[in-house]
Amino acid sequence: MADEWLSLSEAAEMLGVHPSTVRLWSDKGILPVHKTQGGHRRYRRSEISLWAQTNSKSRVEALKPESMMQEVVRNVRVQISEGSLEAEAWYQKLDAEARMQYRLSARSLFHGLMNYVTANDEEGATEAYAIGYEYASRARRYCLSYVDAAKAFLFFRDTLVESVVKVCGEANMPASQSSQMYSKIHRFTDGILISLLQTYESLGHSRQS
């Protein structure tokens, strides 16, 4: 019984995860897997049982908000470094110094969100306002329109959300926990966008007076 061979779906049932998660873990070399001559994945019950025992603690750690956000930030940095930023029309309007400043502002967004997932709502609101102010004042300084200012923020926000979805899926995060994470992200980033637009408008009025 201990050396019984399991199919992918049987291994998933034993681990309590979706079959696609077992497939992903197998392909990444995280989970011990054997291939038949026909290319089908097979798993030994004893190996899966041992793996579950030794990895249960690390899986719990991986699902903690702090660990999740660290992985998210790593994914975002990879996406931005792959050249997607250079394709943005608003980014092409900037000189080298301004581009560097916008890349730095992305870090403040990511770190602010990391702090928010472990902070109370009042602290999060203050952080969101500060980041929105930073985006608006930077856009004004580099002569971007309020539309381009919003596009710049939304580029980084959308990249961040896509990374969160990817990391949550790979970690097989429970639906209730992932839903809570998404709600926090949108609440925080909505606050930033509102602050950005309000600040951009107020800065315009102060220059006219």
Image: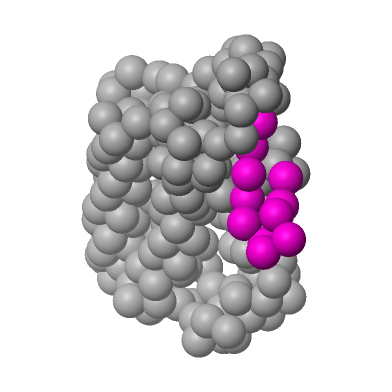
Look at the image and tell me in which quarter the N terminus lies: top right
Q: In screen coordinates, is 139 left or right of 189?
A: right
Q: Position of residue 116 (x, y in %)?
A: 42, 29
Q: Nearer the viewer, residue 100 or 209?
A: 100
Q: Name the residue at 42% across, 50% down.
A: 165
Q: Name the residue at 31% across, 67% down.
A: 204
Residue 38 among magenta residues? yes
Q: Position of residue 112 (x, y in %)?
A: 49, 36
Look at the image and tell me in which quarter the C terminus lies: bottom left
Q: In screen coordinates, is 43 left or right of 114?
A: right
Q: Nearer the viewer, residue 148 or 189?
A: 189
Residue 98 among magenta residues? no
Q: Position of residue 8 (x, y in %)?
A: 52, 44
Could one spot residue 116 in this view of the protein? no
* Extent of the magenta region: 34-44
Q: Nearer the viewer, residue 98 or 193?
A: 193
Residue 59 position (above or below residue 78): above
Residue 177 position (above or below residue 102): above
Could one spot residue 178 in this view of the protein? yes
Residue 71 position (above or below residue 50): below
Q: Position of residue 203 (x, y in %)?
A: 34, 60
- Count every numbered label the image shows and give the total: 0
Q: Name the residue at 73% across, 75% down.
A: 96
Q: Name the residue at 44% across, 20% down.
A: 118
**The quadrant where residue 49 appears:** top right
